[in-house]
Amino acid sequence: KAGVTQTPRYLIKTRGQQVTLSCSPISGHRSVSWYQQTPGQGLQFLFEYFSETQRNKGNFPGRFSGRQFSNSRSEMNVSTLELGDSALYLCASSLVISSSTDTQYFGPGTRLTVL
Amino acid sequence: DAKTTQPNSMESNEEEPVHLPCNHSTISGTDYIHWYRQLPSQGPEYVIHGLTSNVNNRMASLAIAEDRKSSTLILHRATLRDAAVYYCITNAGGTSYGKLTFGQGTILTVHP
């Protein structure tokens, strides 16, 4: 089975621009979660989507948004980019059997650099 | 999710066992304990999880204290490929859909 794929792998943007990142989950997985990883803050949860609905959201400003399509693929968007948005953005998918025991499978991430 | 405390770093020699500790003194009775690791330049990967009993899989063993306030991830024979950041996470389930709360983790260095 193919793993979680994320595109693009690397992205360079300038302040004020917006960006869209894409994630394709493992076939059959219905939940997609997004995380931001920075050297200072570590790995932080952004949001989770299941059946095209956002079920959970982390503590990030409204500039960060996402969506999920009927085939479970997901995109996240960051508007009005700031220098502090430079990070590795990770997507993870899971089967959704039990929220307490589900294993999350992570993609390789998208490295976003904001200049 | 209960707060977890892990040592910042640990070192091991290749082919020796490694015991990675984690404290989670505020864990509730229904929180599972999960371990993930992140190899350099990769996304995190699942290692093992458990609730009360010790657990084994092909990657590692998880020893859970009787009072569940601490656990230990055991790598039986460390290899260079095991050099990674190891994260101990407690997951309350319920409405914490898709959310793993990562701490700073333990950086494991494996010497040849």
Image (tube, coloured by chain):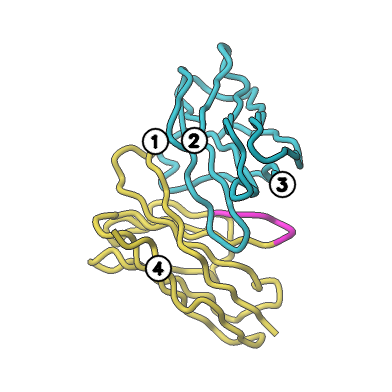
| Few, some or many residues within 10 Å of mark 4 (<14, 14–19, 20+) | many
The quarter holding residue B23 reads: top right
Residue farthest toward the top in the current orientation of the protein: B66
Amino acid identity at mark 1: Thr
Amino acid identity at mark 2: Asn
| Few, some or many residues within 10 Å of mark 1 (<14, 14–19, 20+) | some
Q: Which residues are magenta?
A: A39-45
> Label 3 vs label 2: CA separation?
35 Å
Residue A74 appears in the figure: yes
Tag 3–tag 2 contact (CB < 8 Å): no
- Disc with the residue nearer the chain's start (3 vs 2): 2
Amino acid identity at mark 4: Thr
> Label 4 vs label 2: CA separation?
25 Å
What residue does disc 3 label? Answer: B112
Colour that chain A carries in the picture: yellow
> Label 1 vs label 2: CA separation?
8 Å
Residue B109 appears in the figure: no
What residue does disc 1 label? Answer: A101
Q: Nearer the viewer, residue B40 or A82?
A: B40
The residue lying at 47 percent from left, 35 percent from top is B48
| Residue B109 % position (x, y) | 72, 46
Q: Which chain is cyan?
A: B
Mark nearest the camera among 4 and 2 is 4
> The residue tagged with tag 3: helix, strand or loop?
loop
Q: Nearer the viewer, residue A54 or A44?
A: A44
| Few, some or many residues within 10 Å of mark 3 (<14, 14–19, 20+) | few
What residue does disc 4 label? Answer: A5
The residue lying at 32 percent from left, 59 percent from top is A26
> The residue tagged with tag 1: helix, strand or loop?
loop
Q: Is residue B52 above or below residue A109?
A: above
Discs 1 and 2 lie in a common subunit: no
Tag 1–tag 2 contact (CB < 8 Å): yes
